[in-house]
Image (cartoon, rainbow, N blue to C red):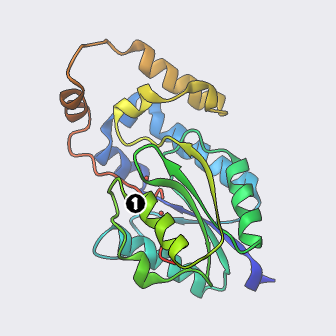
Amino acid sequence: MLSRKTALLIFSRSIEEELRHKPFLAQKSLVNSLYKHTTDIAKQSGLDVIFYDESKQYGINFGSRFSNALENIFDNGYQNIIAIGNDCPQLQVEHILQAQKSLLKNETIIGGTYDGGFYLLGISKENFNKDTFLTFSWNKKTLYNEVIESISSKSLNYKTLQKLRDIDFYSDLESLSLNTISNNILRSCITSITQKRIKIVLPKKLKDSLLSQQVTLNKGSPRAFSL
């Protein structure tokens, strides 16, 4: 029945918009490999996949755009949503299937990232509260903890997934454990980029600044709750 279905929401930018914010992803067509990796995993999950890029998103900030997307999907008859982004090369279909199992037990489920955001969030219509969701500090390092605290304060059941790394800066590529990337093409692409790069010794703050100028963090990566 549609009333019990789970939707898999891919909340992200289009390829063109992603490259505008993260130009380093153009190397070796990395952005294309990331997007294909995400869509392949989504198809493998067997869930109804719903894409929301900037052409469908509306709202004054990330939090409002994401919460509006969730609200729209719930209004279309879905009882559960698993939200992911397109910038987590370590994401596997098993993470999505585990989220689906948790939702069927009425557990909210979240997978955190190393920068304090999250790469996956699964929630039911019953536990979603848009007003609370809008109060979270989106694009801040406190986001993951704020979500956990909100869940705990309402005595809701929840489960956490292993921490993964999403790609906001070039330095995130260098910090990846390549053996945790199951997609061979994606792993080869990242390896080629990081190994061929000329190593220049710079202070970390200056290095990140130079490599990620005008990059806007996307932590809902869900790196997209009000409960």
At numbered mark 1, what does the secondary structure look like: helix, strand or loop? helix
Query: At 42% across and 49% down in the image, what residue appears?
Result: 15
Q: Position of residue 200 (x, y in %)?
A: 25, 13
**116, above or below 190, in the image:** below
Is 4 above or below relative to 178? Answer: below
Q: Residue at x 37, y 43 (%)?
A: 168
> Which residue does the image show at 41% across and 84% down from the upper left?
131
| Residue at the farthest right position | 1
Q: Position of residue 175 (x, y in %)?
A: 44, 28
Where residue 94 sits in the image (x, y, percent)?
A: 73, 48
Report which quarter residue 125 is drawn in. bottom right
Alpha-carbon neighbours of circle 1 within 10 Å: few (<14), some, or many (≥20)? many
141 up-or-down from 207: above or below? below
Circle 1: residue type: Leu
Report the side of 156 relative to 48 (left or right): left
Question: What is the number of callouts on the image?
Answer: 1
Residue pointed to by mark 1: 143
Q: Quadrant of the N terminus?
A: bottom right
In the rendered image, residue 223, in percent from the top left (x then y), is placed at 43, 53
Picture quarter containing residue 103? bottom right
Q: Observer-nearest residue: 105 or 121? A: 105
Instruction: Tell me which residue sits at (68%, 81%) in the image.
Output: 79
Whether residue 158 is visible to the viewer of this picture, yes or no, is yes
The answer to whether residue 56 of the structure is visible from this angle is no
